[in-house]
Amino acid sequence: MSKRPRTLDSFFAPPAVKKARTDSTSVSQITANTTPSNTQHPTYPFAIAHLPPEINEILNFAPADEGRIINDQPDLDLVYYHPYIPKDISRPLFEFLRRELPFYRVKYNIKRGPVETQINTPRWTTVFGIDETARFDPNGKLVDATTGTLLPKDTYACNPRPIPQSLDVLRILTENTTGCKFNFALVNYYATGTDSISYHSDDERFLGVDPAIASFTLGATRDFLLRHKKTPDGDATESKPMKFPLVSGDMVLMRGTTQKNWEHSIPKRKGGDADRGRINITFRRAMIKGGTANYYRYNVGDGPVYKWDEAQREMMQPSRTE
Ligand SMILES: O=C(O)CCC(=O)C(=O)O
Ligand SMILES: [Fe+2]
């Protein structure tokens, strides 16, 4: 056995190919050269590259700016990092994640009374992580979070995926900056100004009371809109809608009573640089198994996987890019 410290990623990587010892190369020399360059897991459609060292190193300078607390409206509690990610690497990081992550265009049906409607999610999505009741053991197997015992195969109807190194680096930085804990990374890719997310709040019960959500922008500038929810008796609160033109590298931490009382959206947009694409990463903490099921249903779904094709400059099904 090698004595080198085993990181999570070295466990997920395939074991070093055993070489017949026909020469004088020692086993320790073979393993010393196998520092993993990607994260692998049976649930991934393909291995996901690690961040290149030049991005990794500069990320250590995050946050690039101290956060500004915005809590001057009823029930609102934001911290706005403008930017969080150092300027030099926000474009390379955007291009890296767009190129290396698997993406999906999720469709699902909703029923309003007797009428069933198909919803086509108007953006690309992907998700990684597992709720607080479980974790991945060093071999990449799902175990109970407290006992560490293997979970039965059918514990989840979906196939939860570990957070790849390329997103986990940012998750850990974000935990350290905010003092919050996160076990999920949700990623949106808005390919053009036509991609969007309509007004909603991330107030699902599986996130617990007053959840904190850290939301990153990479790539194109898009408007982030916030409005107070209607109160039961009409409107009544003395609140004003807000608009942040989020630029590459920005991070907005939404916390406290924000999700309970406010909604947010990224509306469609004409012009600007929207057609160059924008990535949004949100880190969240799901408390129960239902949260895991929900996130995979709506961000991975059951359709085909896509990967960015640099030559075509669009998302393609990998088999067609070869
Ligand atoms: O793209 C954004 O900035 C917001 C994304 C969002 O609200 C969400 O994924 O819930
Ligand atoms: Fe949201």
Image: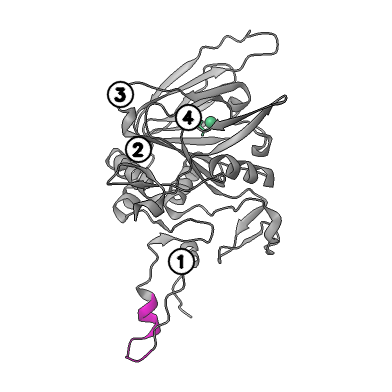
Task: Evaluate whether residue 171 shows in this view.
Answer: yes
Image coordinates for residue 142, horizontal then vertical, percent = 62, 60
Which residue, given by chain and number where applicable, does mark 1 sit on?
13
Whichever of labels 4 and 3 marks the residue nearer the N terminus, that label is 4
Image coordinates for residue 229, horizontal then vertical, percent = 61, 17
Of the two numbered discs 1 and 2 in the rendering, the one whose residue sits closer to the viewer = 1
Amino acid residing under circle 1: Ala
Q: Identify which residue is drawn at 54% across, 41% down.
A: 299
Of the two numbered discs 3 and 2 in the rendering, the one whose residue sits closer to the viewer = 3
Of the two numbered discs 4 and 3 in the rendering, the one whose residue sits closer to the viewer = 3
Q: Is mark 4 within 8 Å of ligand 1?
A: no
The segment highlighted magenta reads: 21-31
Amino acid residing under circle 3: Gly
Q: Which mark is residue 91?
A: none
Within 10 Å of disc 1 (Cα), the crowding (few <14, some 14-19, many 20+) is: some
Whichever of labels 1 and 2 marks the residue nearer the N terminus, that label is 1
Q: CA distance from mark 1 to mark 4?
A: 37 Å
Which residue, given by chain and number where applicable, does mark 2 sit on?
64
Q: CA distance from mark 3 to mark 1?
A: 41 Å
Badge 3 vs badge 1, beta-carbon distance below 8 Å: no
Which residue, given by chain and number where applicable, does mark 3 sit on?
272
The residue tagged with tag 1: helix, strand or loop?
loop
Q: CA distance from mark 2 to mark 4?
A: 14 Å
Image coordinates for residue 192, horizontal then vertical, percent = 37, 30
Locate the C terminus by quadrant.
bottom left
Q: How is the image coloured?
A: one colour
Amino acid residing under circle 4: Val
Q: Which mark is residue 79?
A: 4
Of the two numbered discs 1 and 4 in the rendering, the one whose residue sits closer to the viewer = 1
